[in-house]
Every structure is written in structure tokens, then in C-alpha cells.
Amino acid sequence: MTKEECCRIFGIEDIMDLPQVAMDVIMGDKTRRDAIYAELLDVNRHDMSYDWFRQLYEEEFAQRKKQKQDFTPWEVSELVAKIAVPTIGTIHEPTAGTGGLIISAWWEQCRRIAPWEHFPSRHMITVWELSDRSVPLLLLNLSIRGIMGYVYHGDVLERSVKARYILLNQHDDTLAFSDVVLAKPGEHIVEH
């Protein structure tokens, strides 16, 4: 997906507005969200096997010097997914970025079983991400794929949390989108 396509889909002129607009889409009206998700699927030829925002993020948003952000190469993500991902069970990713590694793991799990036997509730995720710029794209990447689980916006090493999100696929259907629910401060979420 090009920067121009992304700006057109989200209705923005400046790509730096993408994280906030993406968060507004995720947390806003479902009809608008679903229309934008459909456009994203079309532009990316319905290929869900990789992080559509990775290259764009690296070019426009990465804070390599300030936050020491670096990105797992796609080939490494794919290899790790093939070697280390369980067929069924929870996956934990302590530094998720925009979701490249977790998407590779999800894709590998989807490939291992028949589509009618893949239920998001049996393939939960728990991810952490520190970057304010990454979290909206991470949530979008997980939500559009129908992934279920928990996203912690915070520092995994210090276990300090700015926000907690629940990804809920109401139909437990791999082909359905997940809703993103912001957990209220102090609300208990299952700790892993």
C-alpha cells in the first residue's frame, strides 16, 4: 500500500495524522470502520499474510534514535512463526510494533488448520507496545484480522500501562473483524 493510497482511504492530507485517524476509526462508528477496512482489504488484494503498514511506518514514523525502535525483518517473522508458533494457544509478543511478527504467527496458525476449524478464541494473543504512534496501527492490524486478545500500551519491562485494550471477535469467526474495547482504568484484565 502506498502513502497516497493510505491517505486517500483515511481521508487525510498529512501521513503524520494517520495514527490518530486510525484510532478514531477503530474506536468510532462500526459502519465507517467496516467501509475503511473493506477499502484496505481491496488495496492490499486481500492478502492478510503481512503487515500492510510496516514499510510506511518505517519510512514515516519510526523513532529509531529516540526510542531505539527497530523492526523484525519479514523473513525472520515468517521463520519464527513456522518454527515456534503453537498450532493452538496463546501467543505473547512483548514488543509488537505495528504487528508484523504477530501477523506472521497468526497467518501460520491459519494455514495449519482448515478455515472452518480456526476459531480466534482458541488462538488468543497478548501483546505490549510502548510507542504512541504504533499502537493505533497495531490495533487496526489485529482487529481487521479478527484476532482476539489483549493489547497493553505501555512498557513491558517496567510493567507500566498507559492503556489496555481488549480485542473481541463477537462471532469467533476468522473472517469477522474484532471490536476494540478500551479497558477502564483500574478494571481487571486477565494477567499473563
Image: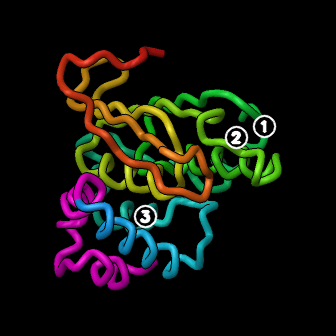
Q: Are marks 2 and 1 in contact (CB under 8 Å)?
A: yes
Which residue occupies 60% across, 50% down? 173
Horizontal arrangement in the rendering, residue 116 relative to residue 137 (left or right): right
**Image x and y of residue 150, in percent:** 42, 32
Residue 63 got which mark?
none
Label 3 – label 1 distance at C-alpha: 24 Å
Q: Amino acid at mark 2?
A: Val
Q: Which residue is mark 2?
A: 80
> Residue 176: percent from the left, percent from the top?
54, 57
Disc 1 marks which residue? 83
Task: Say whether residue 171 is left or right of residue 33.
Answer: right
Query: Residue visible at 42% across and 17% down?
Result: 190
> Mark 2 to mark 1: distance in Å?
5 Å
Say which amino acid is labelled 3: Phe
Q: CA distance from mark 2 to mark 3?
A: 20 Å
Query: What is the magenta segment's predominant secondary structure?
Result: helix
SS type, badge 2: helix
Dot 3 corresponds to which residue? Answer: 53
Q: Earlier in the sequence, mark 3 or mark 1?
A: 3
Give the number of marks: 3
